Image: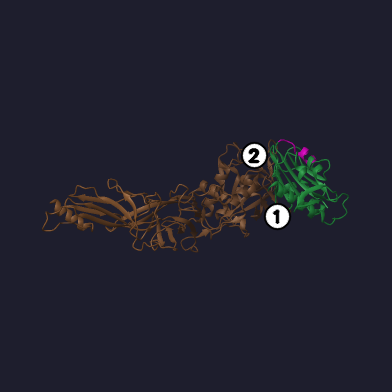
Chain colours: A green, B brown
Amino acid sequence: MSAQNFSRAAALVLLLASGLVWAGEPELPLWAGLPTERLAGLGLGEPTASELDPVFTAPLLDGGFVRWMWSPSVTEAEAAFKFQSVAAASRKQAPTTVPGYDEAVGDGAQLLVLRSRNLVLVIRSHTGRAGEIAASLLAAFAPEGVTTPGPVLGGTPTQTR
Amino acid sequence: MSPLLLALLLACERGGSIELGDSDTPPDRGVLTLSAPPAFDPVLGGAVTVDVLAEGVTATPTLEVHDAAGALVRTLDVADPRWDGRDAAGLYVPGGVYTVRASVVTPNGKTLTETAPLGVVRVGFGAVWAEDDGGTTAERLDLYWHGAKLTQDWTAPISQLDGLEDAEGLARDLPDVTTELSAPTAGAAEPVAYTWDSRPVLTLSVGASASFPDDGLDEIDVRVKAEGWTVLAGSPLRPGEPVTIQRDLPLGEGVGLVEEELKLTFVVDRDDGLERALGTQTLPLRFYALLGADTFVETKENHSAWPAAVEPALRAIDGAAPDHDAVVSALVTWIFDEHGLSYDTQYGASAYVYYRNYRWDQAQFDFTGFLKRKNGSVVNCTDSAAILMTYANMLGAEHYYSIILQDFTLNYLLAIGGDEFVSCPFGSGICGFSYHAVTVDSEGEAVWDATLALDGDEDPGSTPNSVLYVQAIEAEEYLDRLVRSGRATYGYDAQGTIQ
């Protein structure tokens, strides 16, 4: 996917997520998107978007990959995290704590499966940067309701709302 | 035999004439004979040589080419009686029947003249289509260009030229088959997929600049020959009528890749019953001889065979017996030994597969990314199972992945890319899988595994170890050899989706 297409896909995710109904009564807004310009500097290659789901996978330039998976609600993200805790790797993972994330398994360096609100990440870093990348990504995600400079979609400037 | 009698015989045989003079003058023994082939293609086959024989004369004969209206087109050198099909200005003449005229003055002052018709044709194919006869003898199969996201168009030619001559005016062969396998390449031919036992049928149309019978050359029949192929229709050539040819033999006795350069030879019949070749045009072909159509359960455009997948696979397993087990087993060896992949010995994380909707039976495989090794060459069992299953189904071997759950310890195994047997694949003290993905046939009775090889001896739980590729191993035996302790159960046989 080209950077432009990715921008559009990211924008679509932003728009779709922004229209979601609150599930339950979360204390914090759902994550709405990952603005494209914030990918720069994270050491990620060009992401590939799933054709079926709001799931993106990007290679880590120094070895490994990051996959981030959006769910429409916290409840569904909890189910996704529970499943990914087993399925993302065939070595059994132990729970861990990563600041800013609600749930996590992995060693914190080479492998992390994490959930923050409605978002699940799988980070496999061959150079032991999983924790660092998790923190960077958390800072890069845009919460619902927060206006951020967004990519251009269809010639019209768009934002998260 | 006397020279006179010989001259008489030659003249009669060649249809020429002989001047014997009359009774009031000394016998004029001059003899002129001329012969030319019925036709030639100056671009495809080069210059033609006419035979001129003058006997009993001292003068040098003249040799000319005239068009149908009688106009002089070209004067030839009788010492080198070749015509390159060009006029005096150096331009190729149009197709048609021309007259070669030889003349010589005898010692008695008589002029002897001989003529012979000579056809100028221009032949060559400009487009080729691959046909399907519903499987009677030729079952063509879909190919999917994953980079362009489109299925190969059966109504479009697989090979074509935008002109029979190149910029220098030289005859062109049909183009080479593309080496770019993600999308059609302008100016290159496309590969074609058939079942392994098909005898492909091709339809060929002559190029736009061709000129041959019924363009005023009614007496000249240009026929087409192709070694190893039978011409079914369209020969001799007629304007607007394609030529259909069929391969004499099936593509093979098993699956594989068949590349050939088909020599298309254009011939005309001479008066003496022999053939004269006008020239040859080469048609490069590449056939994928598959087991059958794709065997994905879900009908989806991108589940057809991808050239980028099946071509390297077929090169690797060329000649594999045309049955499911042989094909998949050959793929295991290829993936395990020659893909340059290695197992993620730290975590066993899946680089190219995720499971949709938290379900084991809904794997989503980024096959496009895998072909580019976008996320690297370190994989896990889910990746290897998806890779094997995808190749197998694209080749026509119905295949599924299966998940073995959950939390079990291991006997000795050799992981893909590894160089020694281990029973703790993730390092000391970590001697089990939380799950493992393998592939199975449609009955789920036999297992293939491109991620690991097992210890094939009587005691898989201890050294020494002998390599046993997992190729059609009975499902229970596979678990016996893989699992040291814990409850391991097969489940979720599925194919998932690819992109």
Q: Is residue B68 above or below residue B350?
A: below
- Give the image quarter of residue B416: top right
* Disc 2: host chain: B
The secondary structure type at the circle numbered 1 is loop
Q: Amino acid at mark 2?
A: Ser
* Disc 1: host chain: A
What secondary structure characterizes most of the magenta part? helix
Q: Which residue is mark 1?
A: A52
Residue B412 placement (x, y as % from top left):
62, 40
* Callout in the foreground (1, 2): 1
Would residue B364 be counted in the magenta stretch?
Answer: no
- Asked if marks 1 and 2 fall on the same chain, the answer is no
What segment carries the magenta color?
Answer: A127-135
Q: Nearer the viewer, residue B83 or A60?
A: B83
Q: Nearer the viewer, residue A143 or B28?
A: B28
From mark 1 to mark 2, how far is it between C-alphas? 37 Å
**Residue A31 visible, this angle:** yes
The secondary structure type at the circle numbered 2 is loop
Q: Which residue is mark 2?
A: B423
Q: Is residue B171 above or below residue B15?
A: above
Q: Nearer the viewer, residue A44 or A115?
A: A44
**Which residue does the image show at 46% across and 61% down from the upper left?**
B137
- Is residue B70 rendered to the left or right of residue B302? left
Would residue A131 be counted in the magenta stretch?
Answer: yes
Q: Amino acid at mark 1?
A: Leu
Residue B194 placement (x, y as % from top left):
50, 57
Q: Residues within 10 Å of mark 1 (few under 14, many from 20)?
A: few
